[in-house]
Amino acid sequence: MEIKIALAGNPNSGKTTLFNNLTGSRQRVGNWPGVTVEKKEGSLKGTNDVTIQDLPGIYSLSPYSLEEVVSRNYLVNEKPDAILNIVDGTNIERNLYLTTQLLELQIPVVVAVNMIDLVERNGDMIDLNRLAQELGCPVMAISALKGKGTKEVAAKAVEVAKKHQVALIPDIYDKTVVSALSKIQSELQTHIDDSMARWYSVKVFERDERIDEFLKLTDDKKSKIELLIKKVEEALDDDAESIITSQRYDYIGTIVQHAVKKKGSKHELSVSDKIDKIVTNRILALPIFILVMYVVYTIAMGGTSISIGTIGTDWANDVLFGDIVPNFFDGILTSLHVNGVLYGLIMDGIVGGVGAVLGFVPQILVLFLLLSIMEDVGYMSRVAFIMDRIFRRFGLSGKSFIPMLVATGCGVPGIMASRTIEQDRDRKMTIMTTGFIPCGAKMPIIGLFAGAVFGGSSLVATSAFVIGIAAVIISGIILKKFKSFAGEPAPFVMELPAYHLPSAGNVLRATWERGWSFIKRAGTVILLSSIILWFLQGFGFTNGQFGMVEDNNTSLLADIGNAIALIFAPLGWVGDMAWKATVATFTGLIAKEEVVNTFGVLYNFSEVSEEGNEIWTLIAQDFTPIAAYSFMIFNLLCAPCFAAMGAIRREMNNTKWTLAAIGYMCLFAYVSALIVYQLVGLAIGEVAFNFWTIVALALLIGVIYLLFRPGYKPKSEALDLKGMQTAK
Amino acid sequence: MKLLKDCKPSETVVVKKITGAGATKRRIMDMGITKGVEIHIRKVAPLGDPIELNIRGYELSLRKQDAQMIEVE
Ligand SMILES: Nc1nc2c(ncn2[C@@H]2O[C@H](COP(=O)(O)OP(=O)(O)OP(=O)(O)O)[C@@H](O)[C@H]2O)c(=O)[nH]1
Ligand SMILES: [Mg+2]
């Protein structure tokens, strides 16, 4: 018989750690609350008929957040054979709140009190027998990190699943509520399965909208039930939802009083609190934060002697993919006497293209390693705490900082990191704007033009970051005024987990997972695109004959580029460079790293270095500084690479929103490049006054209007406020 | 009447009532801020918002705007 066990628990309680321990599978583990939103399955080690399902970390089964709805739909509809409820032993009171809700589902539950190593170290005592007795289900202590007690708890879960050993419904509510619940239950009888009676009657009592949709009660029944609820609300002088929540916590309070003995007084400062006193100190927090970011960047991407990432990437580009790998393939291919076309395909198309991307791996791995450490230590949620005030202004939340930060390395994990943002709106907004941040792959584009046209000025790279950040801010302000985004940012109710030493296993696993998704991309999308690109630029029609072309100005790629280049003429992409710039932009969609590569190929270099030093003089001949800058702006801001678009699609989980996000980015990029080229160009005397100057001016005014217009105000919000005022 | 948003760091207060409705209120209560619970105000973020609370033995951060919904004494 196939057995399904669901792993449920609060964010940060150690679900993923336990999941990895039980299944041996790999998954991201971090100290940032809410890391896992997607469902992950694995087989219990040593069995082949027991499946373990890692659910998202949730605090409650309320209907208000995506994670909670996902989890409860799974639990209610798919009915796992048992729930393994993982409870953080160092924070037992809040963790048991979810437990009281899980018990009402009438699915067999085993409670695993995790982090028992920390509990013991703190000198606290948890009476497991007492807890089991009160909750009416098996309770066991484990340490997921150290692998202590995990096998036993899994075995217990399998046992209760096989026996279908359902817990007794705990005695949570007072008499008034209980009697109302049983009356509601009898009203529901014909609509639901008996075993779910308690769960549904509590939900109906709470006026849970989603349950309402599901039950489809008659109006008659609804008003009867409403009357019941109203009576209890009057008697207890509170609203139904609050009554249930309060009574749950009161119930837990009494259990904990009996079963848990804490050493030390309540407000005594732990080591973690002492660290936090300094790290999020009013005066020191920002300098420390900037210092941390600076160190992370210097090590991963800087140009100093401790910049391990850069040193690794330089080596990969110059030695590994500049020398060793090409020589290796050259040796094999030459000894096999393969024909010229195939040789070109492999050497220029595949080795050159994929190598250019894989060169980034050292930088990306170092960056992810450092970010994973920050996450595991618990610093990430402090970052959100410190940054919230700023991000809120642009309709984002403090949590948006993490995706943006990760996006400076690579947009794909950046967009993926937006999952930690609970509120749908904030998340969509973050996904739409994260792509504006210049990622590692855009760096070579900046390097190319800085070197070729701007004399290597570091101002160019700085301005690229400023533009990226400005794009985020401007978009945030503009978008939050639209109806689909309007309203105040989401409630920012966030746990700040205690600091702890990073665990090498967790950090390395998280680093590897992120790095691997990047490498996979190089092996698949970029491999394919390199081949296609090589074909398009090497073949074409000469005198009506299709075949390999000598001069790539007559290649298929040139034909395509020429056909589309017109659209970009207002951005200053004119003359000889027009089709090259257009083609490079399109190959940039495949991967931004391809832009420099493409220029290399189009200027007839079989291979160029990361920043394309070989073609600098040629670029300088073709691009005026302002046209170069316009090209750069467009490419930094327009639709991200296909892999990132895929990530947007996955996170939005909605085609309309995906298209809206990508369309918005392209539009924003076009408008920005147009305004800069026409207006700045005019100001510095490089571009003459023309029709597009007027268009650019009009667009500039339009943007300013969008920035300062009063936003859409949702009606329900206004009602809410009124309600609050009368309540006062 | 005193609101949580106006409390100073290192004050300890008891929740009297939670006003408002909807997702925010539910979220606040789910996190353990219910009638009668003791809240210790740890600190205010460097930029003045949000605030950090110690409640039911753990650390919680809350925006002042949301803390406005919580009446304390
Ligand atoms: N000391 C100790 N730390 C643990 C234990 N279990 C997990 N941790 C740590 O707690 C942190 C959170 O663990 P995760 O497994 O990511 O928690 P999660 O429940 O999956 O969290 P989300 O995915 O955010 O919901 C990690 O830093 C773990 O190293 C344990 O038994 N003892
Ligand atoms: Mg997890």
Image (cartoon, rainbow, N blue to C red):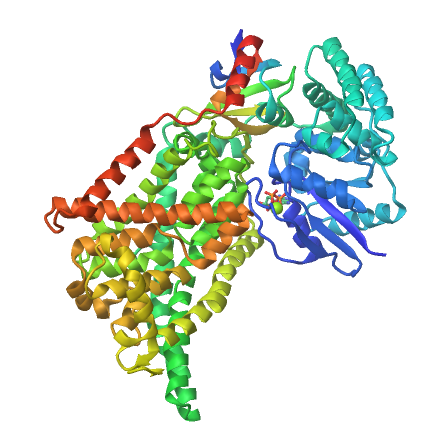
Task: Decide which of A527, B13 is in the foreground and name it.
Answer: A527
Where does residue A414 sit, x and y in percent of width and height?
Answer: 46, 49
Q: Is residue A445 above or below residue A265?
A: below
Task: Decide which of A401, A369 is in the foreground and name it.
Answer: A401
Residue A156 in sight in this render? yes
Where does residue A136 sit, x and y in percent of width and height?
Answer: 84, 33
Task: Decide which of A543, A146 is in the foreground and name it.
Answer: A543
Q: On the rendered structure, is A243 left or right of A578?
A: right
Which residue sits furthest front? Answer: A544
Residue at image point 18% right, 64% down: A622
Q: On the rendered structure, is A102 left or right of A276?
A: right
Corner quadrant of residue A601:
bottom left
Q: On the rendered structure, is B22 left or right of A347?
A: right
Residue at image point 46% right, 54% down: A645
Q: Is residue A150 above or below residue A227?
A: below
Where does residue A252 sit, x and y in percent of width and height?
Answer: 73, 25
